Image: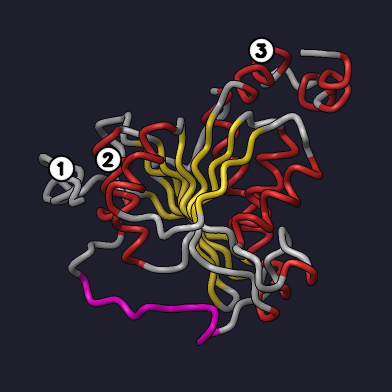
Amino acid sequence: MNDDSLLRYSRHILLPQIGMEGQIKLANSHVLLIGAGGLASPAALYLASSGVGKVTICDDDSVDLTNLQRQIVHATESIGLPKVLSAKKTLEAINPEIEIFPVAARASGSLLLDLAEKADIVIDASDNFRTRHEVNRVCVELKKPLVSGAAIRFDGQISVFDARDDASPCYNCLFPADAVDEELRCALMGVFAPLVGVVGSILAQEALKILVGFGKTLSGRLLLLDAESMEWREIALKKDPGCPVCAGSVSVII
C-alpha cells in the first residue's frame, strides 16, 4: 500500500475493526453487484470509495431520464449509455486504484454462475423476483454470501443470506419462489429517492463487514424501514427445513 493509498483509506485504517490488515483484505476482494440502478448506485459508490479491489457490475439496462431522481451513480450526460458503462466512469473517477468490470447483460444462467464463482460476495440490488431467486440459487450452490435489498414507495428491506453457514436461511426461505407475489416495480409504484440511498448504503456496509470479518451481520435477520414514519423493525429469520433451495440438493439451471 503506497502513501496515496494510506492517505485515501486513513479513516478506515484508524478503526481497530479494520486497520491496515482489513484494508488490505478489501483491496484483495471481489464483489459481484447485480444491478446498476437505485440500490446499486450508493452500494457501488461506497464499495469503490472504500477500496474494494474488484467490482463486477451486471445490468442490461441503459440510463434514462427517469432514473436520475434516485440513481446517483449516473449523470444527465450519461442518458442513453449502458448503465454499467456509466457506473464504471463514475466509480473510476472516485477511485482509480480499483478495477471495475462492466457486464451489459442480464444476470442469468451460465453468465451469472460464472460471475458469482469469481466473486467473494454477491450483492443483489435487482428489482425483480425472478432475478433475486436465481441469484439466491446460485449463491447457495456456490456457498457465496449474499447481501440482498429492496425498496419500493417508502418501504425498504435488507438481509444477508450466508450459505457458508448451514444454519442460515436463504432468500427462498423468506420469499418462496412458488408463492403468489405481486411484482412491484418503481416504474409502476414509485419510490422515495433517499430511501434507496439508505438501503443501498446498508448493502455496502454489510458486504464490507463480511469481507473484512468484523461485527454482526444481518444474517438470520430481516431489517425493515418505513421511511415515511422513520420506523425500523427487525424480524428474526429461520431456515425452512423444507426449502427446496437450501434444505436439500441444489441444481443450477443453465
Q: Earlier in the sequence, mark 3 or mark 1?
A: 3
Which residue appears at 61% of the width and 77% of the height? 191
| C-alpha gap between disc 2 and disc 3 | 28 Å
* Quarter of the rendering occupied by the N terminus: top right
Which mark is on residue 250?
Answer: 1
Q: Is residue 228 magenta?
A: no
Q: Is residue 57 left or right of residue 118?
A: right
Question: Is residue 228 visible from the viewing direction of this image?
Answer: no
- SS label for mark 2: helix
Could you tell me the amino acid type at mark 3? Glu
Q: Position of residue 7 (x, y in %)?
A: 88, 22
Answer whether labels 2 and 3 touch (C-beta < 8 Å).
no
List the residue tagged with mark 3: 21
User: What kind of element bears circle 1?
Assistant: loop
Q: Is residue 185 above or below residue 25?
A: below
Image position of 10 (left or right of 83): right
How far apart are the alpha carbons under marks 3 and 1? 35 Å
At horizontal 52% and vertical 37% (from top left) the residue drawn is: 31
Seen in the image, is 137 located left or right of residue 191?
A: left
**Which of 109 and 221 lies nearest the eye of the viewer?**
109
Callouts 2 and 1 close, C-beta under 8 Å: yes
Disc with the residue nearer the chain's start (2 vs 1): 2
Which of pointers 2 and 3 lies earlier in the amino acid sequence? Answer: 3
Provide the residue span drawn in magenta.
179-189
